[in-house]
Amino acid sequence: MIREEWARFGTSRGRVIGMAVAALIPLLLGLTLAVTAHATCGRSGGGHDTLEEVCPPPLLGPGGQAVEDKFYFVHQSLRGDGSITTRVNSMTGRIKEPPPPGTGGGPPPVPGLVPWAKAGVMVKDGIKQGAQYAAVMLTAEHGVRMQHNFTEDTAGSAGGGPRWLRLTRAGDTLTGFESPDGKQWTEVGRARLDGLPETVEIGLFAASPGALTMNGGATESRFSAATAVFDQVSPQRGTWKSDDIGVSMEPDGVTPHHPGGFTRSGDRFIVTGVGDIAPSTEGQPIERTLVGGFAGLIPMIVVAVTFATAGHRRGPIGRPGAGLAAKSVVIGTLAFLAGVIPAAVVVPMSLTMLPPKGVHPLPAELPAYLQVIVGTGLLFAAVAVLSLALGALIGRGVAAIAAAVTVVFVPYGLALAGLGEWLLTFTPAAGFAIQQSLREYAHVQGFYLPMTGYFPLSPWAGFGVLCAYAALAHWAAGGRRNPT
């Protein structure tokens, strides 16, 4: 039956052309975007020699992921094993409120802390941004945490300060401790930093991520700063150095923009920091190179529905349920190829062509790249099988095409418009999650929204929802064509 349906599909020039168009659209649109895209971030030179500068690549962490590494660090060099102990006595902060509508810069910052403002002790492989580190810290609303190499986070006790913190180094192993009184200590967590050099920097730090808000449907990150008071710092090894790591500069290239700082009186340190030490949640995910896939799904839906309704008009064959299953194998295989082949071309070519033009898709690990490419094929296949079943169930081509387009695209569009993220959990549009390459981090406050590339379900769970709808439609279509 599969051979018969395969031959039947090939006898229709319209269906063959339609499937080819479904593959060509994401391929051509993806390559066109890669060729024409260009992004600039500022100007260099002056007068008639002013030139637009392409945007720089994202900062990468030890694991190759895009990261933020911006904080104030008061530190000393540590050779070999050692430790640092301090008490975070208090932490205060400032947050810039959004400007009133129609105004300029808005009011000055007001007292307050963002939930993931943090201060504590750190060991870092030098002061270069993106270098390995481990830290134990007190946060504004998430208690004590131990974090290392940006992506790893271990929770300690809840609550606020004052809180004693200790970080010890033994070879490549860093261990964080906390104490309410400096006498009874509890281990928070351990981190192994492979290849940590003999000499590292150890000291006190403070950081404060931007305050996140939605302004007229657009995401916005506003200035915030955290100021921590440290005391009873030990041991005191010698001269303390300070670095405002990753501080932004004004257009003159000399004046720091929102700098941090510190003051010292005896063993009392007051450290103010701006920024974050965490994975980056900003930037374009690699699946954005496949935006043409949305348009490619339309002709593919038309092909799948007409493949079902053509057989429906001729009447059911000997075993209609088996015939529908055979059609599903054929249309699913062709749709998978129509999705995976363009993705396998567009994604690697875009990753090669876009960075020199200042467009830098967020890096991902190899499994995520493969998931995006293969997942695009699976998405095409599942939508095609669902459309085929709707065609067999409804029996009228135009109505079935409208139904398939509605259940697949309308919930996704509404979710992107902010009118119901739950639609990407309980409708076939959940299947688009299979193309998600981004990872949501519990210790990073970000805009985890469909419009920024995040889905409420994991990639495979979302794809499972789409497959469940396709199976349900097949069951219903089989029952309609085989009445009891």
Image: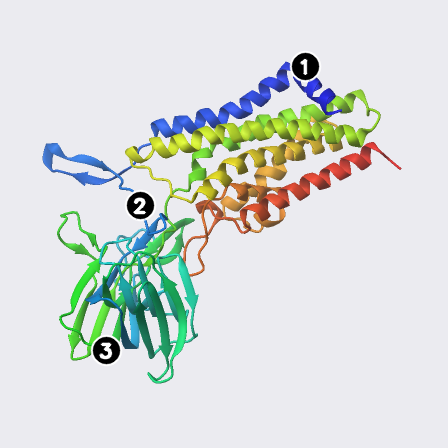
Circle 1 sits on which residue?
11
Residue kind at label 1, given as amino acid type: Thr
The alpha-carbon separation of the residues under discs 3 and 2 comes to 36 Å
Q: Kindly identify the residue that appears in the image at 80 percent across and 29 percent down.
A: 320
- Tell me if label 1 and label 3 are in contact, CB under 8 Å: no
Which mark is first along the chain, 2 or 3? Answer: 2
Compare residues 425 and 5 and report the one nearer the observer.
Answer: 5
Is residue 113 something that shows in the picture?
Answer: no
Judge whether 25 appears above or below 477 on screen.
above
**At numbered mark 1, what does the secondary structure look like: helix, strand or loop?**
loop
- Tell me if label 1 and label 2 are in contact, CB under 8 Å: no
Lateral position of residue 333 relative to residue 37, left or right: right
Compare residues 49 and 354 and report the one nearer the observer.
Answer: 354
Which mark is first along the chain, 3 or 1? Answer: 1
Residue 195: numbered disc: none
Compare residues 218 and 336 and report the one nearer the observer.
Answer: 336
Circle 3 sits on which residue?
234
User: Of all residues shown, which one is farthest toward the left?
Assistant: 47
Judge whether 265 appears above or below 401 on screen.
below
Is residue 92 something that shows in the picture?
Answer: yes
Whole-percent x and y of residue 254?
13, 51
Lateral position of residue 268 relative to residue 422, left or right: left
**At numbered mark 2, what does the secondary structure look like: helix, strand or loop?**
loop
The alpha-carbon separation of the residues under discs 1 and 3 comes to 82 Å
Whole-percent x and y of residue 65?
37, 48
Residue kind at label 2, given as amino acid type: Pro
Residue 58: numbered disc: 2
